[in-house]
Image (spheres, rainbow, N blue to C red):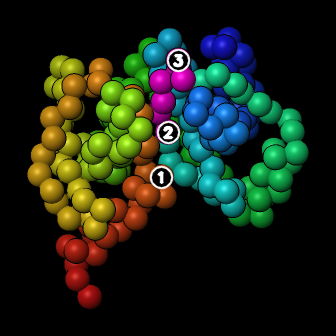
Amino acid sequence: MISVIQKYIEEKAYVSVYTDPDNTARFIYGRILAVNDIYIVMQPLTLDGKEDGILLKLTEDVFRVDTGGEYEVKMQKLIVHANTILPDFPIENTNIIESVILYAKQNSKVLSIELEKSGIDNIIGIVEKVEDDVVTIEVLDEYGQHDGIAHVKISSISQISCDGENEKIVWTLNQASAHPL
């Protein structure tokens, strides 16, 4: 599957990526930025064709990749209508997860992190530092309030959503708390 995905990366193609074996009709639509034996990184789009941050998942979870169907035609219309331009992200195939974490740290972006394939966002917050195999996160709750510090072993991360719709909401609430009306 990696060789198929690499072709779509080179083409900068929009694709549907299926990763949920419990719901085989569910997929993520967007562009794939990088892939290696462990991780895949995408620029997903919202249902209305707008950019939705960066999504990192385990490569082993990808069981299907589609392109060229009616859904893509629909999404291309929505992308044009929304004037969506996907920004370039500096992602290295050899250090995919480190690239995503470093991008989030350097740009003060909120991350949602799933640990050990839990199926939920175990931690939401802002990267404080990275040392060896540990990332330190300033945890934020759903209201954007500070909720402590978490130290996470990078190898236990099974998914990261960076600067997507949900993360932007938490960031906005955090900033509103810092500067109340």
* Residue pointed to by mark 1: 164
Q: Which dot, 3 or 2, sits closer to the camera? A: 3
Q: CA distance from mark 1 to mark 2?
A: 8 Å
Report the side of 163 relative to 85 (left or right): left
Q: CA distance from mark 1 to mark 3?
A: 23 Å
The N terminus sits in image quarter: top right
* Residue pointed to by mark 2: 55
Residue at image position (52%, 31%) is 41
Q: Which dot, 1 or 3, sits closer to the camera? A: 3
Q: For label 3, count other residues whose C-alpha is less than 10 Å away and answer few (under 14), some (14-19) or many (20+).
A: some
Q: Earlier in the sequence, mark 1 or mark 2?
A: 2
Image spot of residue 31 (x, y percent): 65, 37
Residue at the far bottom in the pictured view: 181
Q: Secondary structure at mark 3?
A: helix
- Compare residues 129 and 149 and report the one nearer the observer: 149
Q: CA distance from mark 3 to mark 2?
A: 15 Å
Query: Magenta includes 39?
Result: no
Q: For label 2, count other residues whose C-alpha is less than 10 Å away and answer few (under 14), some (14-19) or many (20+).
A: many
Mark 1–mark 2 CB contact (< 8 Å): yes
* Residue pointed to by mark 3: 60
Residue at image position (21%, 20%) is 133
Residue at image position (43%, 51%) is 163
